Image (cartoon, helix red, strand yellow):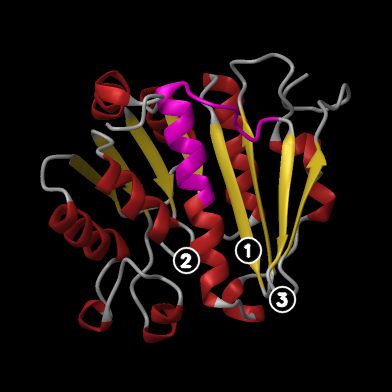
């Protein structure tokens, strides 16, 4: 509240906001922690996986005692310990169809912290349909990327403008490895972009793709433009 760009008015906006977080793994962990500690009034956590010992290297919202628990249950307990005054809803199955559309409609921002293209494409489609901003992040090995898609702005590209269905792969952190702090960096940027969207401050990564190579600590930006032939947003 000491930041003049935020002040009491910005904090109140956060308190009245609802964020849908898809995935409580390496990216969803820092995202959820920072949004909870910032005072976002409602968080909806979606994940159907259980905590495994191999997750603990990078999924910082979980601990050893949480092994074999549902990630949403473990995360909710951790987040409520940080901020018991916010509301946390948990969904222990993949969101699809009408249910996904309903949750997207109720959310002020969708955070994509998933690890597969099928989910990312589905979230992008529902984001465009409901005009709900989508904060997208991804990380694998030593490379990560973040961007913001805001369908409330007709000039904003969407995820399908960036990736076509033909580029979908099965690469995941579990199969290919990832250095743990990279997920913290990318997830923290996602949280930062989400807070800016909720409070209407600053300039987001809309129309820009932030690329990080953590092995050489190279940070670059690429310009994203709307694809006039995009089957989703045009």
Mark number displayed over residue 139: 1
Name which quarter of the figure residue 39 lies in.
top left
Q: Which badge, 3 or 2, is on the more N-terminal residue?
A: 2
First to last magenta residue range: 189-206
In this view, the mark in front (3 or 1)? 3
State yes or no: discs 3 and 2 in contact (Cβ < 8 Å).
Answer: no
User: Does the rendering let one see residue 16?
Assistant: no
Going by the image, does 160 lie left or right of 97? Answer: right
| Quadrant assignment for the C terminus | top right
Q: Which badge, 2 or 1, is on the more N-terminal residue?
A: 2
Going by the image, does 116 lie left or right of 187? Answer: right
Name which quarter of the figure residue 213 lies in.
bottom right
Image position of 8 with respect to 215: above or below: above
Name which quarter of the figure residue 72 lies in.
bottom left
User: Does the rendering let one see residue 27?
Assistant: yes
In this view, the mark in front (3 or 2)? 3
In percent of the image, x 66 and y 30: which residue is there? Answer: 206
Q: Residue 58 location in percent, x, y?
A: 45, 74
* Helix, strand or loop under label 2: loop
In percent of the image, x 68 and y 70: which residue is there? Answer: 214
- Residue located beneath label 2 in the image: 26
Q: Residue 174 location in percent, x, y?
A: 57, 78
Q: CA distance from mark 3 to mark 1?
A: 13 Å
Mark number displayed over residue 122: none
Residue 180 versus residue 217: which sits nearer the camera? 217
In percent of the image, x 50 and y 55: which residue is there? Answer: 187
* Helix, strand or loop under label 3: loop
State yes or no: discs 2 and 1 in contact (Cβ < 8 Å).
Answer: yes
């Amino acid at each position: 509240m000491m930041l003049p760009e935020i002040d009491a008015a910005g904090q109140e906006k956060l308190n009245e906001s609802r964020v849908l977080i898809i995935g409580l793994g390496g990216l969803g962990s820092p995202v959820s922690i920072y949004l909870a500690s910032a005072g976002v009034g409602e968080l909806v956590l979606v994940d159907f996986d259980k905590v495994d010992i191999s997750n603990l290297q990078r999924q910082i919202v979980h601990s050893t005692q949480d092994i074999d628990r549902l990630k949403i249950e473990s995360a909710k307990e951790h987040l409520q310990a940080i901020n018991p005054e916010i509301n946390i809803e948990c969904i222990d199955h993949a969101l699809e169809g009408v249910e996904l559309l309903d949750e997207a409609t109720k959310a002020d921002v969708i955070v994509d912290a998933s690890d597969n293209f099928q989910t990312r494409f589905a979230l992008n489609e529902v984001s465009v349909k409901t005009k709900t901003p989508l904060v997208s992040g991804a990380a694998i090995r030593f490379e990560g990327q973040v961007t913001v898609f805001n369908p409330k702005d007709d000039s904003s590209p969407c995820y399908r403008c960036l990736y076509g269905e033909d580029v979908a792969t099965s690469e995941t952190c579990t199969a290919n490895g990832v250095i743990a702090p990279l997920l913290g960096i990318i997830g923290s940027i996602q949280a930062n972009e989400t807070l800016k969207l909720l409070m209407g401050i600053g300039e987001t990564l809309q129309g820009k793709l932030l690329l990080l190579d953590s092995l050489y600590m190279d940070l670059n930006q690429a310009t994203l433009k709307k694809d006039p032939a995009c089957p989703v947003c045009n």
